[in-house]
Amino acid sequence: MEIELFPNGGWDTHHHIFETHIFPYSPSRHLTPPQATIEDYKIFKQSIGITNSVLTHGLSYGNDCASLKYFVEALGRDRTWACAVIDEQTTDNEISSLVASGVRGIRLNLYEYDAMIDIDKQIQVLKLYAERVRNRGWFLEFLQINQANWAPLSPVIQMLRVQVITDHHALLKAASMLPAGDDVLAQPGLADIVSLLRTGNFWIKLSAPYRSSTLAPHYEDMEPLVLALVEANPRRVLWGSDWPHTPNMKVRSKEEALKETPFQNIDDRTWLTSLRMWLTEEQWNFLMVKNPEELYISNPL
């Protein structure tokens, strides 16, 4: 019997649109995705049963948010919110214009600062953009690939006085991506993230399980990791599809970045069914409805 996933509606808080015939990619991009159109996402959204979504600005578009504004309108502003990418040259007037387009936070482009691994640069970027968005009630969203960095990041994030989100289970690993015999719950970074979740100003997206596990399509080894994150604070977890499923994170050479890289083929419904089976009804409703409503609708601007 198929589980009804969204009896109360549901949010996809992390997806992209790529239409280069309308908006070309940035020449300094770190990745060249294939096309993933507005119509393609509408079909995906309907097939899963999602009611609301959050368009996350693809880093391949750099800091030009013209595509973001266009795509949000095309998807339906009444059911679509957004997370933008800006830079140090973005004006306050430009930021104000993004509010009307449903933007509720910014995604930090750590590639642009050569900061995917460098902890000192990460801290500088977090502080810089916290200053830009704090008075607007916006959040900061980022993803970094060095789990050892979470220990020094933790006290910094707590002092920023903004909401902070990390994507894709913070790239923590399930058993299938760890050395044999390693304890999933003892891996570097997890204890720091659990502590951050309990503070209340830190959120984590349960998204892109293929970045943490090789056991598609059910990702059954993700259960202990997911439960550790949800039970740390069920009010600070979100779900995102990561549609259209870009490749796993890595620092690419310029030549690699400019070469089109195919999407991953992911069974989203089966992954969602796994999540639903692991969580209580209350936890599921927080994850899929109440938490995104708080972050994207109720948060003061």
Image (spheres, grey):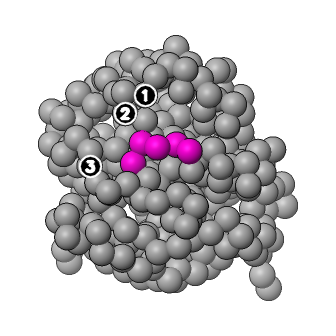
Instruction: Find out whether the residues at labels 3 and 1 contact each other: C-beta distance under 8 Å.
Output: no
Q: Where residue 175 sits in the image (x, y, percent)? A: 32, 72
Outermost residue to the top = 135
Position of the N terminus by quadrant: bottom right
174 left or right, relative to 145? right
Q: Which residue is mark 3?
A: 111
Does the segment drawn in magenta span residue 63? yes
135 or 295: nearer the viewer: 135
Label of residue 87 in the image: 2
Q: Earlier in the sequence, mark 3 or mark 1?
A: 1
Q: Is residue 232 visible?
A: no
Measured Cα–Cα span from mark 3 to mark 2: 12 Å
Amino acid on which disc 2 is placed: Asp
Q: Where residue 40 sits in the image (x, y, percent)? A: 67, 73
Position of the C terminus by quadrant: top right
37 left or right, relative to 27? right
Q: Is residue 65 above or below residue 200?
A: below
139 or 252: nearer the viewer: 252
Q: Where residue 76 sits in the image (x, y, percent)? A: 78, 51
Amino acid on which disc 3 is placed: Tyr
Instruction: Find out whether the residues at labels 2 and 1 contact each other: C-beta distance under 8 Å.
Output: yes
Residue range of the region highlighted in magenta in the rendering:
62-66
Amino acid on which disc 1 is placed: Thr
Determine the main secondary structure of the stretch shown in magenta.
loop
Q: Which residue is mark 1?
A: 90
Look at the numbered disc 1 and give the secondary structure of its residue.
loop
Measured Cα–Cα span from mark 3 to mark 1: 18 Å
Name the residue located 73 percent from the left edge and 55 percent from the top edge. 74
